[in-house]
Image (cartoon, rainbow, N blue to C red):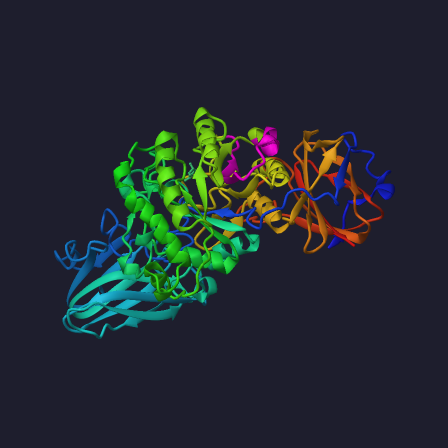
């Protein structure tokens, strides 16, 4: 760590004479704690959008492993030297197994290796890593043994990168699972999997699966470790899941139903992902939800990374942008029951029906669910009517569970005000606000919550992101301009921590070859990952949260846009530190003074963390993942007046130990 440009007032007076803006004094009163900052304050929003789950966080590498996509062989190619009708058939046993009706039947008539095979293309190809173990598994059924399956990974040119042979031995009418592992001998970003058949016989196959050996916590069938690590590094206070519009479905039939996402994988019924067809100009016909990452895995993820779960459930209404379909009130019971049962699944004793399901899945201890959302972006009197039914039932059975309530899709329309009024009349626990707005909105709304009522009704900024210029699409849209606007706005969230108790940027992940929505917090490819500038803003807030806000003012006013400067301050009562956040959203360097009042004695040094970039379009990429990333330094302190040199477009966090 190097000594930085932040120096004591006396020392620096002569150094910053070239500062382009008049020097201001920001006064911090460290001995006047105001609001408590909730441990949940900064969290993450997860949705299976942009290949966030299937093809993303859920590390399964086989696309359409159970042949349940709309086109049953999508993702698969049948390889045969001599074509023969019916050699590979997709069979449908809908009456017998409605959750997983299809499987594939291969009839091999004395085939040699290389004569007959199946190739899976992966989601957008497969990322293959040299030296890594790969676990192949399959469910099979055969009347007699006689076939061998040669499994091999190949690169985009067809070159073999490693493989193994599997000899299914069980015979009869039942299904069996068999696994074989092997190591890849080369790295390839865009590989495929071949399964070559050898021998004689008829075999039924289902749930054809391939996982890398390096999943998060090495869990078989688990999550991509690099993606979870990016979340764990943020130490998020909560994980909102599963969204997002995916909660609602574009029609009720495709709404998210948590009960269909737990238990044995082969019983989790696959459905279409609404982002498959949402945008006509970006169709993703191969986007489905396998629910391999379901509610059990979600609760486990929260536990792993120390985050509170914030599940959002369907309220009996489909997405109001897509359809006006609602469950009639007399048929709302199953929806309400789903909500009640989720609490039991998460928290119930192992002797309860759903607590037992959790225990049978390997987690007898409760997950300690404390809150849940009813409805995502739902609005209108139809929402309020349904919400009231849910609220009554949930509060009657689980009075301590807090309910997150939707305020619709935007922060200032008639629709929003109607809902906000109604929810406050209902004495709602938490109101979920969403805003996808230009950077200018974030800058001019940094005082949004300063005038909100101070009472029991709290706000969850449940989805937000600064959307720069619509002409920029894809990863480039995640630039410094958006990140700085968000950082500036977040000073207002922190200052109002007595009103805003949770906040999460959205969406979280995007695959570089499969995104529907930008900007996004974290970008992935088959092999790599990087955080956008916004990721580092979120991370800096989360890692420098503090326990209580303290005042920081400029001429006795909150610092919210004077000379494009934004600031908030907090103390951490556990570590006895003062944490000041300063955003310079202007294109000019500024040097300002921090007057630190209400502190008996300060440490001799402080740490300084700065996120900045040369221009507003500065961004990160796979080639330069840390182009816009925080830089840390240590500074010497002499007295309680501290000069802060803020570069243009910068976000600075100062941490000072109070003695
Ligand atoms: O974050 C992307 C989408 O934005 C969410 O699914 C939805 O809730 C909002 O409209």
**Spot occupied by residue 317 in the image (x, y as percentages of width and height):** 32, 37
Q: Nearer the viewer, residue 585 or 307?
A: 307
Task: Name the one closer to the observer, 633 or 248.
Answer: 248
The answer to whether residue 444 is magenta is yes
Q: Quadrant of residue 201?
A: bottom left
Q: Position of residue 378 (x, y in %)?
A: 39, 35
* 582 relative position to 323: left or right: right
Whether residue 575 is situated above or below residue 362 in the rendered picture: above
State left or right for residue 126 relative to residue 623. Answer: left
Position of 328 relative to 52 (above/below) = above
Observer-nearest of 164 and 571 = 571
Residue at 36% over, 48% down? 339
Look at 39% across and 59% down and name the residue there: 348
Location of residue 332 with respect to 215 vertically, above or below: above
Say whether residue 21 is visible.
yes
**In terms of image quarters, where does ligand 1 lie?**
top left
Q: Nearer the viewer, residue 176 or 117?
A: 176
Residue 123 appears in the picture as rendered: no
Residue pictured at 61% horizontal, 44% vertical: 628
Numbered range of the magenta stretch: 442-469
For residue 470, side relative to residue 313 (left or right): right
Q: How many marks?
A: 0
In the rendered view of the protein, which quadrant contains the N terminus?
bottom right
* Horizontal arrangement in the rendering, residue 449 relative to residue 416 (left or right): right
x, y (%) of residue 38? 58, 48
Looking at this rendering, what residue extends furthest in the top direction?
Answer: 414
Q: Residue 220 location in percent, x, y?
A: 39, 65
Q: Residue furthest left?
A: 85
Q: Which image quarter is the C terminus in?
A: bottom right
- Confirm whether the magenta stretch covers residue 158: no
């Amino acid at each position: 760590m190097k000594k930085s440009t932040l120096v004591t007032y006396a020392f620096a007076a002569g150094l910053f004479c070239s500062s382009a803006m008049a020097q201001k004094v920001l006064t911090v009163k460290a001995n006047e704690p105001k609001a408590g900052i909730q441990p949940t304050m900064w969290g993450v929003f997860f949705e299976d959008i942009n290949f966030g789950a299937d093809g993303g966080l859920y590390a399964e590498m086989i696309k359409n492993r159970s042949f349940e996509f709309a086109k049953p062989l999508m993702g698969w190619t049948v390889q045969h030297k001599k074509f023969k009708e019916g050699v590979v058939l997709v069979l449908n046993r809908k009456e017998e197994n409605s959750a997983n009706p299809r499987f594939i039947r291969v009839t091999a008539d004395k085939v040699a290796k290389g004569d007959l095979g199946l190739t899976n293309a992966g989601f957008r190809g497969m990322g293959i890593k040299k030296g890594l173990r790969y676990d192949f598994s399959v469910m099979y059924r055969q009347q007699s043994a006689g076939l061998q399956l040669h499994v091999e990974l190949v690169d985009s040119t067809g070159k073999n990168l490693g493989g193994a042979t599997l000899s299914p031995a069980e015979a009869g009418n039942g299904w069996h699972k068999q696994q074989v592992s092997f190591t890849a001998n080369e790295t390839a970003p865009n590989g495929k999997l071949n399964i070559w058949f050898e021998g004689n016989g008829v075999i039924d196959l289902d749930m054809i699966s391939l996982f890398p050996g390096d999943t998060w916590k090495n869990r078989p069938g688990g999550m991509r470790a690099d993606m979870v690590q990016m979340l764990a590094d943020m130490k998020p206070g909560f994980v909102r899941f599963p969204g997002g519009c995916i909660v609602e479905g574009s029609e009720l039939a495709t709404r998210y139903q948590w009960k269909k996402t737990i238990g044995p994988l082969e019983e989790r019924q696959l459905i279409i992902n609404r982002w498959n067809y949402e945008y006509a100009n970006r169709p993703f016909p191969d986007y489905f939800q396998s629910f391999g990452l379901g509610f059990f895995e979600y609760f486990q993820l929260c536990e792993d990374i120390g985050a509170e779960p914030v599940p959002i459930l369907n309220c009996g209404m489909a997405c109001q942008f897509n359809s006006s379909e609602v469950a009639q009130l007399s048929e709302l019971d199953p929806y309400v029951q789903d909500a009640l049962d989720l609490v039991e699944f998460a928290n119930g004793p192992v002797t309860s029906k759903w607590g037992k399901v959790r225990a049978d899945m390997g987690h007898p201890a409760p997950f300690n669910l404390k809150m849940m959302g009813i409805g995502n972006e739902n609005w209108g009197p139809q929402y309020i009517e349904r919400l009231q039914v849910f609220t009554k039932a949930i509060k009657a059975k689980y009075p301590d569970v807090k309910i997150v309530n939707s305020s619709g899709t935007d922060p200032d329309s008639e629709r929003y005000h109607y809902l906000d009024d109604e929810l406050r009349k209902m004495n709602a626990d938490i109101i979920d606000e969403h805003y996808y707005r230009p950077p200018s909105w974030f800058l001019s709304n940094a005082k949004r919550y300063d005038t909100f009522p101070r009472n029991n009704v709290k706000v969850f900024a449940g989805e937000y992101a600064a959307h720069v210029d619509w002409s920029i699409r894809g990863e480039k849209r995640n630039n410094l301009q958006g990140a700085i606007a968000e950082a500036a706005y977040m000073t207002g969230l922190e200052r109002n921590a007595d009103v805003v108790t949770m906040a999460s940027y959205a969406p979280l992940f995007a695959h570089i070859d499969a995104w529907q929505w930008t900007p996004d917090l974290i970008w992935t490819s088959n092999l790599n990952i990087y955080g956008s500038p916004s990721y580092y803003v979120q991370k800096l807030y989360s890692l420098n949260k503090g326990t209580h806000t303290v005042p920081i003012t400029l001429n006795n006013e909150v610092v919210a846009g004077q000379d494009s400067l934004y600031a908030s301050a907090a103390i951490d009562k556990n570590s006895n530190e003062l944490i000041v956040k300063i955003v310079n959203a202007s294109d000019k360097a500024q040097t300002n003074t921090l007057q630190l009042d209400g502190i008996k004695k300060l440490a001799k040094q402080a740490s300084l963390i700065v996120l900045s970039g040369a221009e507003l379009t500065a961004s990160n990429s796979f080639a330069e993942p840390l182009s816009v990333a925080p830089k840390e330094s240590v500074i010497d302190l002499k007295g309680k007046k501290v000069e802060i040199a803020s570069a243009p477009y910068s976000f600075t966090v100062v941490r000072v130990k109070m003695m």
